[in-house]
Image: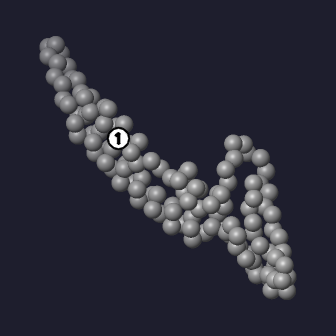
Amino acid sequence: MENDRVFKSLKQSPASYLFYLLLTPLNFYTSSSDADTSSTPIGLVIEPSLACGNMIAAVSANKKFKTEFLEHNINETLIEKSETKYGLVGIKSDSFDALKIKVELKQGLRDKVYGFVNCVF
């Protein structure tokens, strides 16, 4: 898969953390031995801070993931003789079948290049 499609399908959705705001009317009830009951609206403080904190963390994680994925992507990478490459490849699959990577020798580069990683699924 191309880089943008991989990133868009794997990134976190910061807007989904807004569902925490549905818990805003949450109250904390306490009762004493003389049957007095008091309530404290804890949802007004906890849920907005949870939503904002998670949204900020998701945006930060998405930026870091995109940077690392683009830096370590090995799809269509030339591999020199006696060179080892490590990296990431995005795969769209609904199952956990074995991964097959096709390494092909490019025409005209056989004396310089050991292989060419081309992941086709």
Residue 101 is situated, as x and y percent measured from the top left of the image, at 78, 61
State the image quarter where residue 72 is shown.
Answer: bottom right
Residue 41 in picture, x, y percent from top left: 20, 31
Q: Residue furthest top?
A: 35
> Which residue is denoted by mark 1 in the rendering?
18
- Quarter assignment of residue 27: top left
Say which residue appears at 59% left-offset and 56% top-offset: 6
Give the image location of residue 112, x and y in percent.
Answer: 80, 86
Please tell me which residue lies in front, 117 or 57. Answer: 117
Q: Quadrant of residue 26?
A: top left
Q: Is residue 120 above or below residue 44?
A: below
Q: Amino acid at mark 1?
A: Leu
Residue under the point 34% across and 37% down: 20
Residue visible at 45% across and 58% down? 61
Q: Is residue 35 left or right of residue 70?
A: left
* Element at label 1: helix
In screen coordinates, is 78 left or right of 42? right
Q: Quadrant of the N terminus?
A: bottom right
Q: How is the rendered protein coloured? A: one colour
Question: How far from the left and from the top, in percent, is residue 69?
Answer: 57, 64
**Quarter holding the C terminus?**
bottom right
Please, which residue is most extreme toward the bottom here?
Answer: 111
Q: Tag count in the figure?
A: 1
Q: Is residue 31 above or below residue 51?
A: above
Q: Relative to 71, is 24 on the left or the right? A: left
**Neighbour tally class for label 1: few under 14, some 14-19, many 20 plus, Cα within 10 Å:** some
**Residue in the image at 32% along x and 32% along y:** 22
